[in-house]
């Protein structure tokens, strides 16, 4: 992050009110600003199994720049959902295009990696059975199928591969 104002149409770091990033983005876009709110896709255990959920990569922060050359950054701080611009010594902090492109790329790669799978397990993960007759037992994932996970459990002093519904397994 730099405080150099020389770039034409720089990206500014916007501080949003807690859990109001989506509102801030919508209101800034309505005013003609270009806004980037990087998101992470994560797995979340739901009643029906595992679901993908998006959350803000940098809670309370988004990146904004003027959509037109004559547009001022002044109205940003009075936008609903916005606390203000991050500043150092009274000078708004800016982000160069390369850094912003790297953040975009990271968010896209992370989302693509999560989208490739139907649940969050990898072979070798330590897991616990959270439901069903084997509830409370721990083991290691040995294989993964679309709706089931094969877990190596130690039962009666022997290692045994047990296929368990993916919704019954949690990471430890």
Image (tube, rainbow, N blue to C red):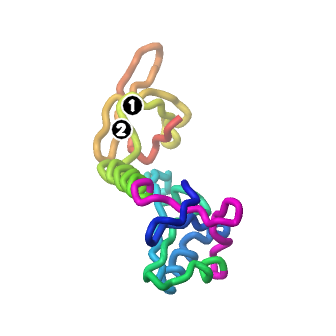
Q: Quadrant of residue 60?
A: bottom right
Look at the numbered discs 2 and 1 and tell me whether their residues touch, using CB distance below 8 Å. yes
Please state, as top left, top right, bottom left or bottom right, where the N terminus lies in the image. bottom right
Along the viewing direction, whichever of 120 and 169 lies nearer the viewer: 120
Residue assigned mark 1? 141
Q: Quadrant of residue 103?
A: bottom left
52 sits to left or right of 113: right
Along the viewing direction, whichever of 131 and 74 lies nearer the viewer: 74
Magenta stretch encompasses residue 95: yes
Mark positioned earlier in the residue sequence (2 or 1): 1
Q: Residue at x 57, y 69 (%)?
A: 21
Q: Position of residue 20 (x, y in %)?
A: 61, 71
Residue assigned mark 2? 149
Magenta stretch encompasses residue 81: yes
Disc 1 element: strand
Residues shaded magenta: 78-99
Along the viewing direction, whichever of 39 and 139 lies nearer the viewer: 39
């Amino acid at each position: 992050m730099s405080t150099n104002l020389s770039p034409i149409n720089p990206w500014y770091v916007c501080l949003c009110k807690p859990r109001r990033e989506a509102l801030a983005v919508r209101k800034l876009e309505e005013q003609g600003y270009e806004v980037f709110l990087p998101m992470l896709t994560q797995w979340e255990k739901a009643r029906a199994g595992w679901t993908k959920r998006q959350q803000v990569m940098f809670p309370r922060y988004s990146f904004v720049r003027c959509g037109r050359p004559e547009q001022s950054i002044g109205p940003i701080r009075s936008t609903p959902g916005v606390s203000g611009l991050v500043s150092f010594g009274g000078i708004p902090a800016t982000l160069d295009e390369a850094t912003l492109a790297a953040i975009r790329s990271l968010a896209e790669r992370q989302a693509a990696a999560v989208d490739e799978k139907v649940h969050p397990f990898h072979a070798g993960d330590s897991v616990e059975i959270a439901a069903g007759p084997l509830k409370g037992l721990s083991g290691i994932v040995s294989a993964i199928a679309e709706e089931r996970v094969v877990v190596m459990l130690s039962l009666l002093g022997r290692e045994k591969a047990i296929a368990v519904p993916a919704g019954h397994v949690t990471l430890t």
